[in-house]
Amino acid sequence: MSSLSIPISEPLHIFDAQRAARLLSKAIGLDDVSILHAVTAVTDLANHLFIRNERSGKIDLAVVRRHDRLGLEVKAGDAVDAPPVRVVFERC
């Protein structure tokens, strides 16, 4: 399975995270609406990390398999020991 970790410490990193989410979502066969949802979630989480957490944090993207379906797992975490936010988008 594929996975990526994108540090979020400058505005360009937000675009990197969006692009990675779009590419991984397409690669696993998510439909256009699910791809849009995944990219929107990544954008919101990355913006939050950049603006609210003193420009430090990371977005982790991973292709996961649950039962017989592929999905995109998105985790957002900051440099503090707060628990990460985790969202999974699955192919139907």
Image (cartoon, grey):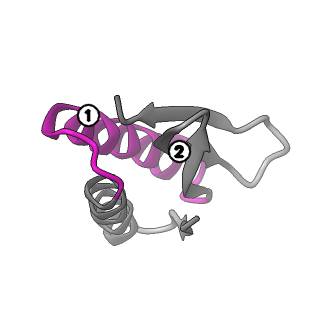
To which quarter of the image does residue 57 belong?
Answer: bottom right
Residue at the far front in the pictured view: 68
Alpha carbons under labels 1 and 2: distance apart: 13 Å
Q: Is residue 61 above or below residue 82?
A: below
* Camera-side residue of 25 and 50: 25
Give the extent of the magenta segment.
28-56
Residue 12 percent location from the top left of the image = 32, 71
Q: Is residue 35 magenta?
A: yes
Depth order, front residue of 88/51: 88
Please name which of the two marks, 1 or 2, marks the residue nearer to the observer. 1
SS of the residue at dot 1? helix
Type of the residue with mark 1: Ser
Look at the numbered discs 1 and 2 and tell me whether their residues touch, using CB distance below 8 Å: no
Most distant residue in the right direction: 81
For the point 51% across and 63% down, the residue is: 8
Q: Please say if 32 is above or below 63.
A: above
Give the crowd class for mark 2: few <14, some 14-19, many >=20 residues within 10 Å: many
* Dominant secondary structure of the residues highlighted in magenta in the image: helix
Q: Using residue 59 as the reference point, say whether residue 89 is left or right of it.
A: left
**48 or 26: nearer the viewer:** 26
In the figure, residue 59 lies in which quadrant?
bottom right
Which residue corresponds to mark 1? 34
Name the residue located 39 percent from the left edge and 61 percent from the top edge. Answer: 17
Image point 29% across, 45% down: which residue? Answer: 39
Amino acid marked by disc 2: Val
Residue 18 colored magenta? Answer: no
Quadrant position of the N terminus in the picture: bottom right
Q: Which residue position is annotated with label 2?
A: 74
Q: Secondary structure at mark 2?
A: strand
Residue located at (47% from left, 52% from top): 50
